[in-house]
Amino acid sequence: MTETTIKWWQKAVVYQVYPRSFQDTNHDGIGDIQGIIDHLDYLKRLGIDVIWLNPIYQSPNDDNGYDISDYQKIANEFGTMSDFDRLLEAAHQRGLRLIMDLVVNHTSDEHAWFKKSRASRDNAYRNFYFWRAGNGEKAPNNWDSAFGGSAWQYDEKTQEYYLHTFSTKQPDLNWENPQLRQSIYDMMNWWLTKGIDGFRMDVINQISKRPGLPDGPVKPHSEFGDSQVTNGPRVHEFLREMHREVLSKYDAMTVGETHGVTPADGLKYAGQNRHELDMIFEFQHLRLDNSQHGFGKWSTRKTPLVGLKQVINEWQTGLNGQAWNSLFWNNHDTPRAVSRFGNDSPQYRERSAKLLATCLHLLQGTPYIYQGEEIGMTNAHFTRLTDYRDIETLNAYQEVVTQKHQLSAPEMMARIEANSRDNSRTPMQWDATENAGFSETTPWIRVNENYPMVNVKAALADPDSVWFYYQKLIDLRHDYPLITLGDFKLLLPDDEAVFMYERRWQEQTWIVICNFTDQTIDRELTSVVTAQARLIISNYQDDGGNQLRPYEAKVYAL
């Protein structure tokens, strides 16, 4: 890979917009397309290249738009297709590209395909989904749903079960059916012909199920078995067909959400000559703080830095020259990065937000900024269950506390406060006015109470803010080919406090040094940082040399 052969998306920085929480302009408490249009100049000023929109399709919103009832209509709360066309044109006029969420592992149970499918056992759409007879009085197999309970729902009308690996209102599509696949490809071509610049593909490595849908091993603390739906036997065949029928015809960018993958899997999904995807989201680094006692993500553990470095090293070196990494700390399904990996106290919030930005944006790959990350937005720290809206959160509370009595209410609320998806879904904090400038009416979910201090207006008034630090990092990526093309080498792999690595390209070498603690520590840096080294960027105003101050991050060119 050289400067002349890199793809546009390899040098790009992506900004993820969660439309429901970005900007409300029609005073219904829900963000909308016009709100995104109104802030395009803000995004352009930040320096990003690509906007990724979470789903804005027609949906009953059982899972905040990931239950789609019509792929080619815009949900009323967001606007109209005419509004979307204006957004696309306005983005392109500013040199910004736009990618859409593609959700094709499942639809809503209110989609026309499913309505027809459940009408009778012998209709033409029956095989668009997974319908099975029960196993006596039980479901067809022991698979669990990601949102709790069985992955099967009994349907009285046709007296069979349908598969839903998420909500009961999200029936899984049967990719074994070529008619179903062609219908999806037709829809994708429709959007790409309209002019969008690519897709982020939701749980795309779940589209191939195990033949025969066999029982899975029973999980700890559960009556259900693992649904075993990731990385199925035909997934690569399906993706290559998708590339052949759709993606090869456009200069489009693709990124697949792929849980349960290793770097070896990454080479299969995103290998340069595989003709599948451009890059994938992997989640190994986000699972290091999961509970070891059967509660998965509902944990209060902190991520061990040595483990984090090991995972990042494996992906950086494992894909180098063969596939492409996506880089992210958080998104709409995770806690806020500064609360999870940094320190969201008033004393250290900004410093640690800049540290996380430095550590991520100097890696090889395409960085993703989740809305509000550029101002250091934090977890919501809601203490009442009634403040939460997320179906996964509410179902988990009912299962763990009310049904199984595995944890007390206060214990589970502490885990929800740390890990709920709603932490990242609170309204964007634009200013210190009521509702953080997001809406003139009560928002669909509460605003984070720290918005008078943490907001865009305050950040833009402070040259030393997190926002301007992100802008500098984006400029560096655009200006220095080393960040895109350079090799990665992990330094001090066993250091429990410092994340240090080297980037090298041609005759250039940069060293990235990040102190992930709230302590001042000493490290002998002169062996790697020579006296002639030039400080490229730092989150302190001066250089302390071998002394690393709390959450200090600095980058040297040797």
Image (tube, grey):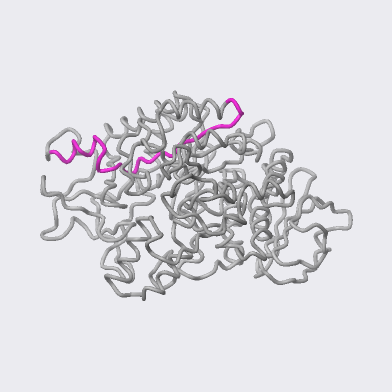
Where is residue 196 drawn, in percent x and y? 48, 29
Where is residue 125 drawn, in percent x and y? 20, 35
Quadrant into which the N terminus falls: top right
Q: Is residue 118 magenta?
A: yes
468 or 209, nearer to the observer: 468
26 or 354, nearer to the observer: 26
Toward the right, the furthest residue is 531
Instruction: Tell me if 161 is positioned left or right of 200 in this view.
Output: left
| Residue at (61, 55) in percent of width and height | 454
Compared to 280, does 299 lie above or below? below
182 or 320, nearer to the observer: 182
Instruction: Tell me if 466 is positioned left or right of 369 in this view.
Output: right
Compared to 128, does 317 lie above or below? below
Instruction: Tell me if 69 is positioned left or right of 448 in this view.
Output: left
292 or 348, nearer to the observer: 348
Range of residues picked out in magenta: 93-119
| Residue at (38, 70) in percent of width and height | 294
Where is residue 496 drawn, in percent x and y? 65, 70
| Badge count | 0
Q: Is residue 42 magenta?
A: no
Compared to 331, does 309 lie above or below? below
Where is residue 402 drawn, in percent x and y? 29, 70
